Amino acid sequence: MIDLNRVNYATGSKEILHDVSFSINTGDKVGLVGSNGAGKTTLLRLINGDLTPTSGEIIKTNEEIGILPQDMRDWLDHSVYEFIEEVTGVKDAREQFDEQCANLEHDSSERTLLLYADALEKYDKFEVASFDANLEKALKRADISSIDTGKEIGNFSGGQRTRIALAAVFASRYDVVLLDEPTNNLDDRGVVVLEKFIEGSNAAFLMVSHDRRFLRNATSRIIELMGGDQGMRQYGLGYDEYVEARERAKQATFNRYEQYEKEKKRLDRAARAARIKANSAGSNRSNSDNDKLTAHFRKEKAASGLASAASGMSSRLGQLEEPERPEEDVSLKFLFKEEAGKKLNLLSVSNLEIDYGNGHTIGPVSFSIRTGDKILLKGKNGSGKTSVIRGIMGDAPVSSGDVHASKQANVIYVDQNQTLPLPDDSALNNLRHLAPSLELHDAINLLIRFNLKKDIIQVTPGSELSGGERAKVLLAGIAANNVGLLILDEPTNNLDIPTIEALEHALKNYNGGVLIVSHDRDFVQNIGITNTISIPTR
């Protein structure tokens, strides 16, 4: 269906994809993983035809390919109907068919007949005549059958928009479906429904995802992009087998590099020792033994031999080929300094209600957080989890109830869009804004620990960073502060898997309080949730 042959892509002097080759065949369910900035979204856009490779080729047969957007911000002024009609290719198929029908009325040439036949085939393939009925089924499957499809997407909550995007997947009739982080913001039930749909579909799927359980359940093959000039690795295995294979490869890389370092040190020590002995042998001549020519000759020969040995070892040292460096694991630690043995009341929420008008009320919600608590705020898409958090932070209209945060809490809030405080400034300046006491070199080193590259750290404006890169800057800001209460709304959105695992470890060992919204099932399971608060449905 699709063959990628040594595909490269660069912007200016920056290489994003290098020597990428793989095939997608009928019914394949392929997971695409890699660190933030490795080029996953770029690869989807290349396959979809939105971008052109710098070199290499992407060979496609006549199958229809479609990319379904996860980010709805470009569609806020479109109605639900318009959005789904367009992203599923139905609108384009209808317009092509109408155009060719009109052409046939005044032109019956062979070329026009062929164009009409192609348009008719696409019209039938995309089930254009049945679109309204298919849309109704898709909305029901996405659990939003009651929404007004004539309303603009900007009028719906974030959770509802997620469900609308899910309905678009269900309504599509593409042969190859490209999905970019399809589980972002999607509740547990929605993810399970999506997994079952993918499993039962005859279409091929190429899916960028950081959701490990989704990858485990929905894919049968993993492709890992290494980023820059590092190319890619392909694993004809499921996700768990991929993890095991990757760990073995990682250990082998570490062993090779460790052996290289040992040999390098051995040759360096031996060369230095030989040079010292050669110098010593050459200088230990006795003036009183000038007439002992044989002894002198032996010393000169020994010195020459040692010098030659030193030179040979130095040459071998220079010829020693450095193997691939092992990846450095992301390390992350959050600190909260408190009096030993003393638990602090960090946050108290009592009967909080948020009224959005038209009889739509969220709540009431009541809970408290003390040091050591990890509270999961749970609810289906559209139930108002983000609204409750925004109400706590004073960013949403609270109709009743009380919120009290301790002055000792030092609250840090990370929203689900990973919004930076200085969107027009660099990652470095954003971090120093979040942590003013941080010295320049410490700030740079902290960002490097998150595997952010130099141009990302010091040059690229925050508005041009990917969601994962913005999230890393915000996590660095948390790590650089003494934080008593973390409020995190979908913190794993757009993060790469190694950083998610580092975040899990940091939260599990964090002694402050945490209020979190997350639909990442493995993540929630691994961080040690102490209590779950469900948003009442009305």
Image: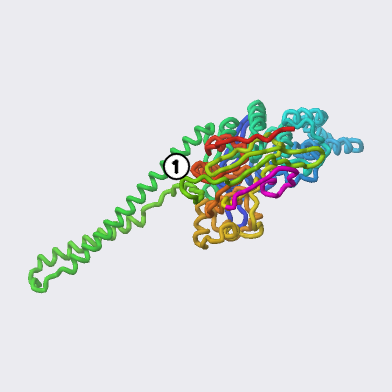
The amino acid type, in three-letter code, at marker 1 is: Lys
**Which residue reaches farthest bottom?**
287
Can residue 429 be spotted in the picture? yes
Q: Residue at x 34, y 53 (%)?
A: 264
SS of the residue under disc 1: helix
* Color theme of the render: rainbow
| Residue 304, image x, y percentages | 21, 63
- As drawn, 347 above or below 216: below
Q: Position of residue 153 (x, y in %)?
A: 78, 42
Q: Residue at label 1? A: 250
| Number of marks | 1
Which quarter of the rendering shows the N terminus?
Answer: top right
Residue occupying image coordinates x 55% and y 52%: 476
Task: Give yes or no for residue 402 being in the magenta stretch.
Answer: yes
What residue occupies the far right of the structure in this picture?
106
Q: Front-most of 476 and 132?
A: 476
Q: Does the stretch in magenta take in 508?
A: no
The part of the image, by quadrant, that contains residue 347 is: top right
Residue drawn at point x = 27 percent, y = 60 percent? 272
Q: Position of residue 149 (x, y in %)?
A: 81, 36
Q: Which residues are magenta?
A: 390-407
